[in-house]
Amino acid sequence: MDKKNESGLFSCCFAEALGTFLLVFIGCGVVHSAVLTGSQSGLWQVAIVWGIGVTLAIYCTNHISGAHLNPAMTLAFAFWGMFPFRKVFPYVTSQVLGAMVAAFFLFVIYQPYIIQREIELGIIRGETGSELTAMCYGEYFPNPGLLSNSEGLYDPSKRIAFDSKVSHFNAFLAELLGTMILACVIFALTDSFNSKAPESNLAPLFIGLTVAVLISVIAPLTQACFNPARDFGPRLVSYFFGWGSIAIPGPRGGFFTIYILAPSVGAVLGGGLYKLHGSFKS
């Protein structure tokens, strides 16, 4: 969402860090809960918690920074002349730092469950197969949850068939399309000239629901990123806490193109799609 006021840059950056912390702590937190404890039943439960996390983060920070909370959206707003380019780097840095802090606290409080899960799955952190726990932080394609056998153990014999289900191109396309749709919706909901949009105080709710819906569609393929800070911040934390090359560059590589580049391009295209639609009406 674009910035509504002239808050100082420090205040805006603090708000962006706080908001991104909230959405990552809640969103990645529910992934921890689902993966490590089995507390969630089905993808929709994870998706809707993510959506609520996004909604709450926007409500907490929109009046200060505009609640971008996503480097892809910051870039899209700047690209389409709705945000000054000179503030892009401070905003993006704040978003990544907020995501890192959230991931660090999740690692601390869930560490016993991570160790227990590694023992149950028969995996060693940092070795092939440990993306089954690293998926709590960074994202992988396809969703690593299908890599275990009927007994719940990591099954390396499934690797080739597993990887073939989602190619690098399909993963890139999925992230690009998902973020494009999200950005188009955000531009529509925050357009003051869109008389058919919900009232401004309801926009965060509909943005959160959009995130939840898109996660339900895209998560089996790529875990549904749509936000480079959400992926890169937690991925860095997992890299430094034992997952190493499983986190960066990942067992198949491609994390930069799929989880940073694709959402960034998708957000710019989504904003352009909405603006193009508006130009047809005028």
Image (cartoon, rainbow, N blue to C red):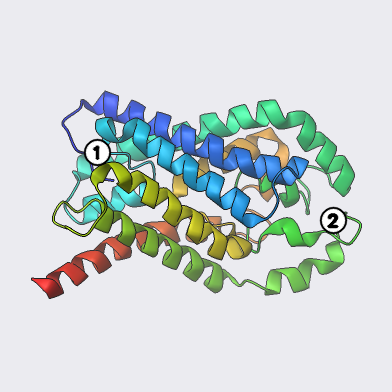
Q: Is residue 94 above or below residue 266?
A: above
Q: Is residue 147 visible?
A: yes
SS at mark 1 in the image = helix
Instruction: Tell me the number on the disc at residue 154.
Output: 2
List x then y, in percent, for residue 19. 41, 33
Q: Name the one closer to the observer, 248 or 157.
A: 157
Instruction: Tell me the number on the disc at residue 21.
Output: none
Looking at the rendered image, the quarter that the C terminus falls into is bottom left
Q: Name the one closer to the observer, 111 or 247.
A: 111
Which amino acid is tagged 1?
A: Lys
Name the side, left or right, on which 158 lies relative to 64.
Answer: right
List x then y, in percent, for residue 215. 53, 57
Residue for point 52% across, 46% down: 50
Residue for point 58% across, 61% down: 222
Residue for point 71% across, 31% down: 110
Name the side, left or right, on which 128 lies relative to 122.
Answer: left
List x then y, in percent, for residue 246. 69, 49
Which residue is labeled 1 in the image? 87
Q: Is residue 88 above or below residue 6?
A: below
Alpha-carbon span between mark 2 and mark 1: 44 Å
All told, the count of numbered labels is 2
Q: Name the one closer to the observer, 90 or 195.
A: 195
Q: Is residue 139 visible?
A: no
The image quadrant that residue 141 belongs to is bottom right
Q: Is residue 170 above or below residue 242?
A: below
Which amino acid is tagged 2?
A: Tyr
SS at mark 2 in the image = loop
